[in-house]
Image: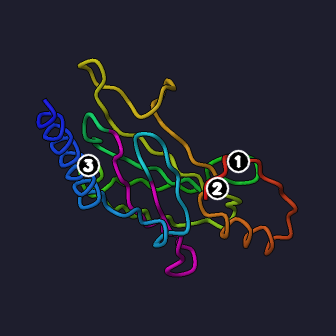
Amino acid sequence: METKVVLLRGVVLTGLGLSLVACAIFTPERPRDDFAHSAIRWDIELYWNCVRPEPGLLQVEGVAISTYLQVPIKDLKFHLDGIDAHGASVSRTEGAARDYLIPLMARSPYRLTLRTVGREVRFDLAYSFLGQESGGMSSSSNSGEGVSVLRDVCPAETRSRQQKSGTGLHLFALQVS
């Protein structure tokens, strides 16, 4: 009887140890240090940098990571909008993640290049993707449109434009790091 208990403990401890090693090996590091901004939800993580390759252009470059256990993220699409002081979109570009299917913990890069018009006071990033629930297709959000929006995704660009224009706008937005 005592031998069975010791043997059972050994099997359980070995299984637990192998599981921990497997998690350490197969869990990729999060790219937090590589990107200035991030938005993390239960099903997807987005990381990005905002760069100005030349005057009049804004690029948002980043990676998306699927954290949803059951199915891959499918067809991740983006819209980057330049928003004016009245809340209207004055410039827009669209794009998609490189990979149509993003499996669990996989990275898929994306790049959006926006030609600015000079009236933008902030830049908003909208994204949507397909998932699967209850055997049917569902979108990335519970809202009717199925689009998630991150406001003011390039805060340094927003601050620099406000300082140049002298506006004292105070934007209340969903804060992203």
Q: Secondary structure at mark 2?
A: loop
Write the residue at 57% across / 48% down: 150
Distance of mark 3 from mark 2, alpha carbons?
A: 26 Å
157 vs 91, nearest the viewer: 157
Q: Quadrant of residue 118?
A: bottom right
Q: Quadrant of residue 128?
A: top left
Relative to 128, residue 170 above or below = below
Residue highlighted by disc 3:
102
Distance of mark 1 from mark 3, alpha carbons?
A: 29 Å
Return the x and y of residue 139 as percentages of the image width and height: 38, 30
Return the x and y of residue 11 as percentages of the image width and height: 15, 42
Q: Tell me which numbered mark, 3 or 2, is placed earlier along the sequence.
A: 3
Q: Tell me which numbered mark, 1 or 2, is placed earlier along the sequence.
A: 2
Label 3, residues with CA under 10 Å away: few <14, some 14-19, many ≥20 = many
Whether tag 3 and tag 2 are in contact, CB under 8 A, the answer is no
Write the residue at 36% across / 61% down: 110
Say whether residue 150 is left or right of residue 136.
Answer: right
Label 2, residues with CA under 10 Å away: few <14, some 14-19, many ≥20 = many
| Mark in front: 3 vs 2 | 3
Q: Which residues are magenta?
A: 46-68
Q: Which mark is residue 152?
A: 2
98 vs 55, nearest the viewer: 98
Whether tag 1 and tag 2 are in contact, CB under 8 A, the answer is yes
113 vs 49, nearest the viewer: 49
Relative to 167, residue 74 above or below = above
